[in-house]
Image (cartoon, rainbow, N blue to C red):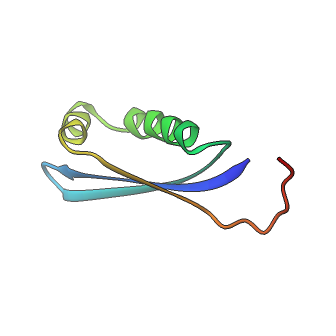
Amino acid sequence: MHSYSISFEYQDRQNGATKNEVKMEGSTIPVVIGKAARAFFKGLDRKQRFDANKGLTISCTREAGGENEGT
């Protein structure tokens, strides 16, 4: 498993630019983004979800790990 840092950014109608960063573990980037997106959208209310659907920016980076993993 690799560790990834995923950030979500969107324009909220009340708070302006809103950014949320999540750290997750997973085998591949698509798996991690899917898990993080589901968790992110579960935490939003109806209006925030609408705002995020209008323009959501997702960025993902792999965290440097010092462990030696066998693949």
Question: Quick one: 2 or 41, which is closer to the camera?
Answer: 2
On screen, residue 1 versus residue 41, left or right, reads right
Percent position of residue 62, x then y:
59, 59
How many marks the image carries: the answer is: 0
The structure residue drawn at horizontal position 49% and vertical position 35%, both measured from the top left corner, is 34
- Compared to residue 44, the image places residue 18 above or below, namely below
* Quarter of the figure with residue 26: top right
- In the image, taking residue 49 as reference, residue 36 lies left or right, namely right
Query: How far across and down, in percent of the image, does residue 4 sit?
Result: 59, 55
Give x and y (percent) for residue 1: 74, 47
The residue located at (17%, 39%) in the rendering is 54
- The quadrant holding residue 51 is top left
Q: Is residue 43 above or below residue 15?
A: above
Who's the residue at 57% across and 36% down the image?
Answer: 31
Q: Is residue 8 above or below residue 48?
A: below
Residue at screen point 56% across, 42% down: 32
> Farthest residue toward the front?
71
- Left or right side of 53 for 32: right
